[in-house]
Image (cartoon, rainbow, N blue to C red):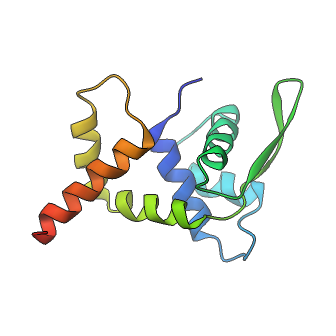
Amino acid sequence: MKLNHDLVRYVLLSIEESKEMTGPSEKTLLTSIKKYGNFDWNDIAYTIDKLNEANFITGKVVWSNNHPSLIMPGNLTLEGHKFLDNIRDNKVWQNTKDIISKFENVSLNIISSVAANLISSKLGL
């Protein structure tokens, strides 16, 4: 599967919105993500899995017969907050996507660096 960078951002924003100390429930997360568009449940589960592997969230996915049976989004880690802080602003996100669109694939680290550089240049740093 391919990691959808927009969905990564939407999942992180949705988890951050939660007022629950342990993060949103699966239902709350799915409802929150729907405001950004219609995404396949398998894609959401895959994104949650990869964000956990990247240490951006504490959540996990329970898989059964190669299909997600339960999504537990968890909460943002400090690394997740750092990444989201770089890509939160819609204008920064759009500019970041414009820059990275010149390449077939880029990592989340590169996305974060591009966004951080855009922010730094706007601040005159």
Instruction: Please report the residue visible at 50 percent of the width from the left and 66 percent of the height from the top.
Output: 81
User: Residue drawn at (53%, 60%), measured in percent from left and top?
Assistant: 80
- Relative image position of residue 15 (x, y in whole percent): 61, 62
Q: Name the side, left or right, on which 95 lies relative to 93.
A: left
Q: Is residue 107 above or below residue 22?
A: above
Picture mark count: 0
Give how far across and how far down residue 56 sits, in percent.
58, 55
Image quadrant where residue 1 sits: top right
- Let me know if residue 33 appears in the view: yes
How far across and how far down the image is residue 67, in percent? 81, 28
Residue 46 image offset from top left, x and y in percent: 66, 36
Give the side of residue 1 with respect to residue 101, left or right.
right
Query: In percent of the image, x 60 and y 47: which residue is there?
Result: 51
Which residue lies most toward the right here?
A: 64
Q: Is residue 36 visible?
A: no
Please, is residue 20 above or below residue 2 in the view? below
Q: Residue at x 64, y 57 (%)?
A: 57
69 displayed left or right of 50: right
Residue 99 relative to residue 46: left or right: left
Quadrant assignment for the C terminus: bottom left
